Amino acid sequence: MTKEAKQELEEMGEETESFIETQSKLRSTIMNATKLKSNNYMGIDILDDKGAYKNTFTIMKELSSVYEEMQENDKRTGSKSLNLLLETIAGLHTLTSPNI
C-alpha cells in the first residue's frame, strides 16, 4: 500500500494494519510460488519499482509466462506451487487444477 493510500484510508477512519499484512503476505506468496529458473528464482512481483501495484493485465501476463514451467516443476518435484498460486489469486481454499 502506498503512503498516500494508507493516509487516505486512515483519514476516512479505516483500519489499515491488517491490509498491510495481507498485501505483504499476498506479495510474498506470489513471489515465492513463482521463483523459477526462467526468472532467475526472483519470482513475479505484483508491485512495480516504485512500490505501486502493477495493473491486473500485467500481473496476469507475467504469471502466464511461467504457468507451464510451474506445472512441470510441480510434477517433477511433487510441490504444489501452482495450486498455491491459484488459491492465492482466486481466493479459493480447495482447488484441483487439471493437468497437474
Image: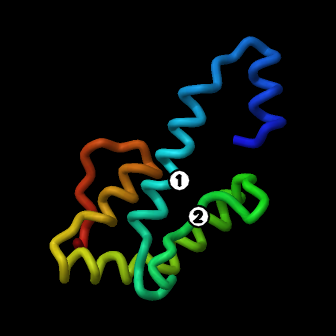
Front in this rendered view, residue 22 or 100: 22
Q: Residue at x 21, y 68 (%)?
A: 79
Front in this rendered view, residue 97 or 69: 69
First in sequence: mark 1 or mark 2? 1
Residue type at mark 2: give it.
Asp
- 2 sits to left or right of 59: right
Residue 53 higher or lower than 42, as above or below: above
Front in this rendered view, residue 62 or 26: 26
Front in this rendered view, residue 76 or 100: 76
Q: Which mark is residue 45?
A: 2
Residue 85 higher or lower than 98, as above or below: above
Mark 1 surroundings within 10 Å by alpha-carbon count, few (fewer than 14), some (14 through 19), many (20 or more): some
Query: Looking at the picture, how far across and down is residue 36, in whole percent?
Result: 41, 80
Query: Looking at the picture, how far across and down is residue 76, in whole percent?
Result: 19, 83
Q: Residue at x 42, y 43 (%)?
A: 91
- 16 sits to left or right of 41: right
Residue type at mark 1: give it.
Arg
Question: How far apart are labels 1 and 2 at the CA level?
Answer: 7 Å
- 75 sits to left or right of 73: left
Query: Looking at the picture, how far across and down is residue 74, in whole percent?
Result: 24, 74
Residue matched to label 1 = 27
Tell me if label 1 and label 2 are in contact, CB under 8 Å: yes
**Image quarter hosting the N terminus:** top right
Query: Looking at the picture, how far across and down is residue 42, in whole percent?
Result: 51, 75
Under circle 2, the secondary element is loop
Q: Residue furthest bottom?
A: 38
